[in-house]
Amino acid sequence: MKPHLPLPSRGRKKNSERKSVRRRRVDIQRTGLAVATALILSFLLCIHLLPDKVTLAPGDIAPADIRAHRSVRYSDSYEFRKQQAEAASSVSKVYDYVPTALNQSLRDTSALFDAISSSRSTQGLSAESRAAQARAQIRNRVGINVPLQPILTLVLAPDKVFNHARDVTITLVRKSMSGEVKDDVSEISKIQSHVSSAAEVSLGSTRYAAAVSDMARLVIRPNMIFDFEKTANDRERALENVKPVYKDIRTGELVIAKGEVVTRQHIEKFTALGLRQRRVDYRTIFSITAFVSFLVGLVIIYLARYQPSIYKTTRLLVMLSLVVVVSILGLKVGGGLLGITSGVQLAYIGMMFTTTAAMVLAVLLNPQIAVMIVAVLSIAAGLVTNYEMRYAASTLLSGLVAIYAVANIRGIGDLMRALGAIAITNVVLVWIMGGLLGDSAVDMMSSSVWAILLVALPATSLFWYITWLLERPFKVTTHISLLELADTNKPILKRLVVEAPGTYTHSMAVGNLAEAAAEAIGADGLFAKVASYYHDIGKIKRPHFFVENQSIENAHDRLNPTLSGLVITSHIKDGLEVAREFKLPPSIQDIISQHHGTSLVQYFFNQATEQIEPSPLLEQQFRYEGPKPQSKEAAIIMLADSVEAASRSLAKPTIPLLESLVEKIIADKLGDGQLDESELTFRDIGIVRDAFIHTLAGTLHARIEYQNSVSSENGKVTANGNSDQELAGASGKTEEAD
């Protein structure tokens, strides 16, 4: 995949002194970035972010006796937390007394029985209906949902029994709430159980006792409400009163015995003794720092010599540095978080991060840089894995395969194929290296699983998300984002097809031409195609001023040539505004600004010269502002734009006519200097010419004739590569069909 990077802005030439100042400033930035990168990488490789002298973790079995090599006093956080928990649990809950609770419960009790009494005296209704009526009254007056059965029991009870039940209920409620009733589930449950027993004592084991019990339990409420804030304050004060627990370890004291299970208390002792911190080895630090600095310098020289466009762009150097640093950081932290400080798992984690970095750089920068970086990271992986070169070699080969797999990635299907390629490569490397070094079949089977689970799967997942994450901040356009832009359901393209349908059709046709030509010379066909879709989006601002969108009336009939030329050239500025509005990538915006270069709007210039004497100043007024195409793709789109527009004037296209038209347009662009700043060679131009002719021959075989055809059945081509017929349009005044 060839990423597309926005070109640096071009303005007026500055004097040599200003250039020198700017060059010094950029060099300082690059130098500072290189030094910072070298220092950070050296730090990551020299200083272990997680301890490795004692690698035991809670739950491990101590392989040998470990004794204290010095005396130390330390804070026993385990005992401290234990005492805090005990202090917190010893604090009783705080409750607030509610003096109105009893009276409210008695009022509710009276309301219950009043409602039932009223229903008992109702005539002409069944017992069930009267019970339902009482239940509804209770719900409305008291807000309590009483079961229907106890109400029905009391409705059918004799008057003497009913009155006795009422007195018993009031007595039970009063006695139950005479003491403390806390809003605690267990305490409420005990009181309710006591009420049931007391009701049976007064009324016997009858249905009336059950009804009274149900009524009493419904109205009993807590008179002691839990105060959360006061309780929390009391517990906080209790915790504050707990003092840290300090313990002493004496020299020679046994910290952990062989075969003993490691606990968190042991870990605290290891930390206090410094056993979990690596001793500083200044000789190793100096050697690794010097080696890393050498590698960073080597990469800088490579970029300056073979990748000047990237070397001159500071933000891309920052991105390169960021990817490398994060890959090394991920190796260190990832191994530490998994409790791994050596062994096969750490090696495969290193391979995973290196493979991810290789794929990301291949897509965001280019495969050549990715190959260079993966070689450097493979050496770093060898350092981290205690100089085991088998893992360095595997990391290098895995990274190279990953670069090849994603070099032209265009979607999820390609991503899955890359995943498969990486997985297969890693498994094959496991068995090859294992065979060379005498590994057992069991070890190689285990390593094959790690090669898939710790390398292939996470690497491809991380690659996809990291690429998406870095594209926009660093202004890089990859095939992943280009495929999204190629969707014709994008809002801007939907606007174009509705508001400027002729321009939309023209843009699609230009895309096909540009894609074929770009792929023929090894340029990025997908980018050329997608950029062509958007190159004329500025025409949606004033679509009817362009011939492809006109039907009958020509808007230029009301304008003078100078104003018409200004309207035509303004679609570049309008296109950039629309592109910024819809947040199109900078590389697409470059194509919008460059696809006409500094070409002359020939037709309106000729009209102007009929009234005014030709002059360089007048000619400048009818030229686009530029800049000229700065890349192969931009130059191809310029040529495809003119070729497609001019080809629409051919009433009966033949191969000789197509050859003549394409050659004329290319010659005119070359003669006008429009391709001087692009990367196209004369060999490329010849291939582009053949691709245009081949593509046009396949698409124009059934083109209908246009009205107002000029002599010889086909219109002549102007110096801009546009037919006189297209320029003339319906009335003789409009822009070339670009």
Image (cartoon, rainbow, N blue to C red):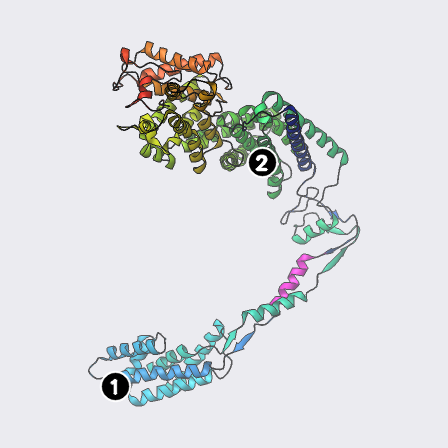
Type of secondary structure dominating the magenta stretch: helix
Above or below for 628 versus 60: above
**Residue 177 position in % (x across, y down):** 47, 82
**Residue 671 position in % (x across, y down):** 46, 13
Q: Residue most toward the top?
A: 656
Number of marks: 2
**Residue 320 position in % (x across, y down):** 59, 31
Badge number at residue 349: 2
Residue at the (59%, 38%) spot, across then down: 330
In magenta segment, residue 89: yes
388 and 705: which one is in front?
A: 705
12 and 178: which one is in front?
A: 12
Q: Residue most toward the bottom?
A: 160
In magenta segment, residue 166: no
Q: Is residue 503 visible?
A: yes
- In the visual, does 47 lie left or right of 151? right
Structural crowding at the residue carrying mark 1, measured as other residues with C-alpha within 10 Å and reported as few (<14), some (14–19) or many (≥20): few
**Residue 195 position in % (x across, y down):** 43, 81
Q: Amino acid at mark 2?
A: Ile
- In the visual, does 379 lie left or right of 275? left
Q: Quadrant of the C terminus?
A: top left
Marks 1 and 2: which is nearer the front? 1
**Magenta-drawn segment:** 75-90
Q: Is residue 409 visible?
A: no
SS of the residue under disc 2? helix
Q: Residue most toward the left?
A: 124
SS of the residue under disc 1? loop
Q: Amino acid at mark 1?
A: Ser
Looking at marks 1 and 2 on the same chain, the residue that comes earlier in the sequence is marked by 1
Query: Which residue in the structure is indicated by mark 1?
Result: 121
259 and 640: which one is in front?
A: 640
